[in-house]
Image: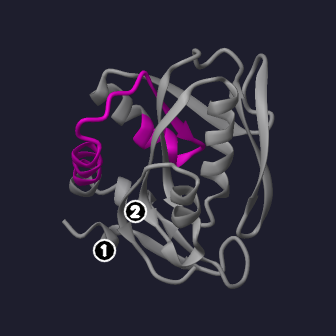
């Protein structure tokens, strides 16, 4: 299945000049959603994880399904102030601003092998922040997976240069 054909592009969102790649249209299509999960699991074949971390918000959808299929626990990483209890936080830059991610301070155990899932890799800032949080907890990032890669923005190359294994299902050129 051509996943790209089910992904909507919204120009000038959230600001002028950005082409927002929206996977909600992919997820609402039953065959597209099943194909996405099947392709992710095929790309992850041989990976064993203690935990799957999903990045807010679309990473929750895919991360939960993948965690279930892998027999792993699921851990959400959320925007600042959304998690109750004690958290660790990490600031990061987006292609259109800055933000902060947080994880519960007791969500991972030392030595856990962790798979990180998000919907898209652009500049890599969100995934870098998630990986830093995981490593601050003395857990190990075994791979970062996303449905979409925007290679022209350099995020996947930057993450690979830092030693992370990157898995993506499709690419879009441009921003």
User: Residue 30, position in %: x, y?
Assistant: 25, 52
Give the image quarter of residue 168. bottom left
User: Residue 10, position in %: x, y?
Assistant: 55, 76
Which disc, if any, is residue 63? none
Q: Nearer the viewer, residue 8 or 56?
A: 56
Which residue is disc 2 drawn over?
25
Q: Nearer the viewer, residue 83 or 162?
A: 162
Q: Nearer the viewer, mark 2 or mark 1?
A: 1
Q: Is residue 59 magenta?
A: yes
Viewed as shown, does residue 131 lie left or right of 64? right
Disc 1 element? helix
Between the residue at mark 2 and the residue at mark 1, the CA separation in whole angstroms equals 10 Å
For marks 2 and 1, the one nearer the N-term is 1
Disc 2 element? helix
Viewed as shown, does residue 140 lie left or right of 12? left
Give the image quarter of residue 83. top right
Q: Which residue is located at x 72 percent, y 83 percent? A: 16
Q: Is residue 134 above or below residue 169?
A: above
Viewed as shown, does residue 42 lie left or right of 13? left
Which residue is disc 1 drawn over?
5
Q: Which residue is located at x 33 percent, y 72 percent? A: 4
Q: Which residue is located at x 26 percent, y 42 percent? A: 41
Q: Nearer the viewer, residue 139 or 20?
A: 139
User: Residue 52, position in %: x, y?
Assistant: 46, 31
Q: Which residue is located at x 67 percent, y 37 percent? A: 78
Give the image quarter of residue 29. bottom left
Give the magenta-colored segment's residue range.
34-63
How packed mark 2 is, by other alpha carbons closer than 10 Å (few <14, some 14-19, many 20 or more), is some
Quarter of the picture containing the N terminus is: bottom left
Viewed as shown, does residue 59 lie left or right of 100? left
Q: Is residue 82 magenta?
A: no
Q: Is residue 151 above or below residue 140?
A: below
């Amino acid at each position: 299945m051509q996943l790209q054909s089910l992904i909507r592009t919204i120009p000038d969102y959230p600001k002028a000049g950005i082409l927002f790649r929206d996977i909600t249209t992919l997820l609402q299509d039953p065959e597209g959603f099943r194909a996405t999960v099947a392709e992710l699991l095929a790309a992850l074949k041989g990976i064993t994880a203690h935990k799957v971390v999903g990045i807010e918000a679309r990473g929750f959808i895919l991360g939960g399904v993948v965690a279930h299929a892998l027999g792993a626990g699921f851990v959400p990483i959320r925007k600042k102030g959304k998690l109750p209890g004690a958290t660790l936080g990490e600031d990061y830059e987006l292609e259109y601003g800055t933000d902060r991610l947080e994880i519960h301070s007791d969500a991972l155990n030392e030595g856990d092998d962790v798979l990180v899932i998000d919907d898209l890799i652009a500049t890599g800032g969100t995934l870098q922040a998630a990986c830093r949080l995981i490593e601050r907890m003395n857990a190990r990032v075994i791979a970062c997976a996303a449905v979409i890669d925007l290679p022209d923005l350099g995020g996947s190359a930057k993450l690979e240069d830092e030693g992370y294994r990157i898995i993506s299902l499709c690419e879009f050129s441009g921003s």
